[in-house]
Structures are given as structure tokens and as C-alpha cells.
Image: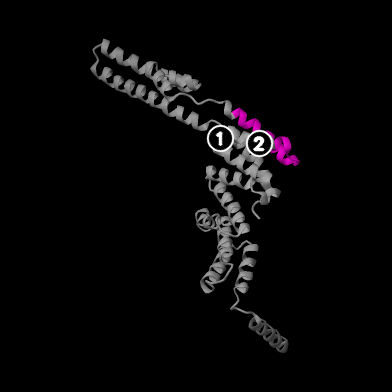
Amino acid sequence: MIRSLRVSLLFFTVSLSAIDWDDPRTHLHFADHLADSGDFYRAITEYRRVLYYFPEYEKNNWVHFQIGRMYYYGGRFANAKDYLIPLTIDPDPRLSFLSHNFLALTYFDSGEYVNASRLFRELSEDPSAAANREEYIVYAAMSDIRHKKFSQALDILVPLEKNSSSKEFKEFAKLAMDKSRAADKKKPKNKFLATTLAVLFPGAGHMYLGEWDNAFVALSIVGATGYLAYEGFVNANTTQSILFTTFSSGFYAGSIYSAYSQTLKYNNRIGDEEIQSVAQKFSRLRFSLSTAF
């Protein structure tokens, strides 16, 4: 047993001595192994080691790309952008394309939908990306929908639904088009009109929004406290009149502000249900997309 252990140790020592640690590819192989196994941050450490020890290595731009890619997979989107943005103008067309690809995904997953839509559209028009063109269109449309640019999404979804040979893409495009049209028909409420109505009649601003329960509460409280304040004045009850005048004025002012703020919330929520429905379909479809290679 001791002899076999010595042989194993000797073999391991010889194997280590055979590795050329002065070759950057040795470190890159190890970094790639860590990346493939999902150990993104250790992979980043190894890629950085290559940059530090081999600053003249001719493929260091690709090493920078790998670091950006690892940051994307690890969810560190700000760091990913720092590495990927400079590489989008790299003279190597393949490196530039892949950097655009992962930068677009980074923008999308970090919620920067305007930039994501722009880059995915550019990628969909890139001749070298013809094989993934429809995937980029799906991402661009989803970016527009997330940003509530429904009519903009329709512009690229219509030809996708009509011309795609993929059943999944056709189904996604049809659902996204239906929901985009439905969301686009919903018009925002006028916050100044809602406020004016609330000033003229307690609860009228909420009626304009279709919030009948809030309108009833506002009208009831302001009306009741106003009546009690009036009763106090009639009966020369100073305490009652002052107390309920204060309450009535406060509730009245609060109902006006509530009508204004609820109008803003109503407008901000327009399309949320449609977005959620499309996003659920997209999340299932995304597993079959290959843009994050």
C-alpha cells in the first residue's frame, strides 16, 4: 500500500511538473473549467490572473470578455457592463458581436429596457446573427413591452407572427400582440381633471377613476363631519364647531390629494396585467433561446 501511494505521489508530482505555468493557456483552461462548472467568481479570479501575469497576451480582449460574461451570469450587471461596453467596438467582429449580445442581455436583466431594445434590434439586423434573428426580435419586443412601448413592440411582432416557422415564436407573438393592443387601448386619466372634480365635490375625483368605494368613504366622512360642524355653529357650540370644522377640512383636503395620487397610480398601472401575462409566456420560452451562449 505504501509503495502504491509512493507511485501515486510520484505520478502526481511528475504531472504537475509537466504543466507549463508560464503559458497563459494553462490558467485559461482552469478558468474555463470553473466557468463551465458555474463557479463564476473563482473563474473571474483566474481570468484576472492571466491579465496580471500576462499583460502582453494577444487574446487579452477575449479574457476581458470572459470576465464580463461571468459577471453577467453571476448577476453583477454593473460590473458586466464595465467590461463589455469597450469590447463592442473591438476590431474582431466575432468579439464585438458577442459583446453586443451579452451587453443586450445585461441591459435586459437589469431593467434597462430602452438600451436593451435598441441593442436587440441592432443584433436582429446583423447579417452574422441571422440564425438568432427571431430570438433577438422576441427579446426586443419583450423589452418594449416591459417599458410599456406597446405600439413599438407591435411593429416587430406582426412580421414575426406572420413569417416565423417556429410554433413557439408564433404563439408568443400572437399573445404579445393581443396584450399589447389591449394595453394600448387603455387611456391614462387626467390628474388635473380628477383633482378639480375632487375640489368641486368630495369623492367626485374617485368616481372619475371608477373607485366607487373610495368615493363613498370620502363623501360620507366629509359630509358627516361638515354637518356636525354646521350643527355646532347653529347651536353656538364653539368646541363642536371648531373640532368638526378641522376634521371636515382635513378630510376634504385629504380626499383632494388622494384623487390626485390615485390618478398617478392608475396611470402607472396601465398595462401591468398585460405585461405580466406576456412575461409569463416569455419566461417559459426563454429556456429554449440560445442567445446566452
> Which amino acid does the dot numbered 1 rest on?
Lys
Which percent across, then down, holds residue 230? 30, 13
Describe residue 185's horizontal placement relative to residue 163 as left or right.
left
> Which amino acid does the dot numbered 2 rest on?
Leu
Q: Is residue 284 magenta?
A: no
Query: Which residue is rendered at x = 47% and y = 31% of the image?
Result: 265
State whether residue 54 is above or below residue 79.
below
Q: Which residues are magenta?
A: 160-182
Q: Is residue 165 magenta?
A: yes
Q: Quadrant of residue 276?
A: top right
Query: Which residue is rendered at x = 59% and y = 67% of the image?
Result: 59
Check disc 2 and report the residue beneath it. 157
Q: Give the SS element for disc 2.
A: helix
Describe residue 226's horizontal placement relative to residue 71 as left or right.
left
Q: Give the SS element for disc 1.
A: loop
Q: How many marks?
A: 2
Residue sticking out furthest to the bottom: 3
Residue sticking out furthest to the top: 234
Whole-number angstrom distance, CA of label 2 to CA of label 1: 12 Å
